[in-house]
Amino acid sequence: AQSVSQHNHHVILSEAASLELGCNYSYGGTVNLFWYVQYPGQHLQLLLKYFSGDPLVKGIKGFEAEFIKSKFSFNLRKPSVQWSDTAEYFCALEGAGSYQLTFGKGTKLSVIP
Amino acid sequence: GAVVSQHPSRVICKSGTSVKIECRSLDFQATTMFWYRQFPKQSLMLMATSNEGSKATYEQGVEKDKFLINHASLTLSTLTVTSAHPEDSSFYICSAPGGVGDTQYFGPGTRLTVL
């Protein structure tokens, strides 16, 4: 069975601090990996995705994530967070060839001005 | 980018009544759509896959007779919560894949409150 685990339930950072949110997955095959963001009162939006190729992927708003196959990880990073990054972040996987997404439980990020 | 809409955004109903939620892909066609349920402080849980022209595929533990799904056209899927109970209160989200190599696009969600 496929699963996604996000280690941090709630992260609180000051503005300009660096961010790394952990995501590990379990899947017996080729995966596509995603990070979605849900700002307060808004719907899920794609931050970035990994399908193949360069394991370091860059997304919107200065976010990036690195796919490390040996560690089954896809951690999200941002060198300097802003107050506007306050949101909930979801890691998700999709088995290659399938459109079904499996989500992690999400990490709530609170950035203090 | 592609847009998925949901209607209504919020609904309150009495226990025992049925509620229909619509999910539309506004500028693209979707032969497949997905319905999720999101509990507070928890992940999105896939409930079912809606297939245009055929029966929906339900995830384990999801009652088919309670959560009726109809994929009426290439741009519309509906989820009907039948005989709703307070424990059905939740946030329901639909999504539609944009195509091969593309991501899924999510609707804004529908908050259902059953009194």
Image (cartoon, rainbow, N blue to C red):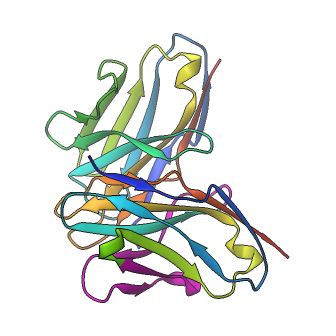
Which quarter of the image is occupied by the C terminus of chain B?
Answer: top right
State whether residue A34 is above or below residue B83.
below
- Taking A21 as reference, is B105 left or right? left
Vertical arrangement, residue A87 with respect to residue B94, above or below: below
Find residue A61 and report its image quarter.
bottom right
Q: Quadrant of the N terminus of chain B?
A: bottom left
Q: Is residue B58 left or right of residue B81?
A: left
Query: Looking at the picture, does residue B63 appear above or below residue B93?
Result: above
**A57 in the magenta segment:** yes
User: Where on the picture, by quarter, is residue B90?
Assistant: top right
Does B77 lie within the magenta span?
no
Q: Residue at x 26, y 57 (%)?
A: A27
- Name the one closer to the observer, B2 or A93: A93
Q: How many marks?
A: 0
The residue under the point 73% across, 83% down is A17
Q: Position of residue B91 (x, y in %)?
A: 55, 39
User: Residue A99, percent across and down?
Assistant: 25, 57
Where B94 falls versus A10 (above or below)?
A: above
- Between A90 and A99, the one lying in front of the other is A90
Toward the top, the furthest residue is B16
Residue at the location (29% across, 60% down)? A94
Could you say where residue A103 lies in the image, as x and y percent from the top left?
Answer: 42, 53
* Position of residue A25 measured from the top left corner of the image (x, y, whole percent): 36, 60
Residue drawn at (27%, 42%), measured in percent from left and top? B49
State which region is magenta. A40-67
Q: Nearer the viewer, residue A82 or A18?
A: A18
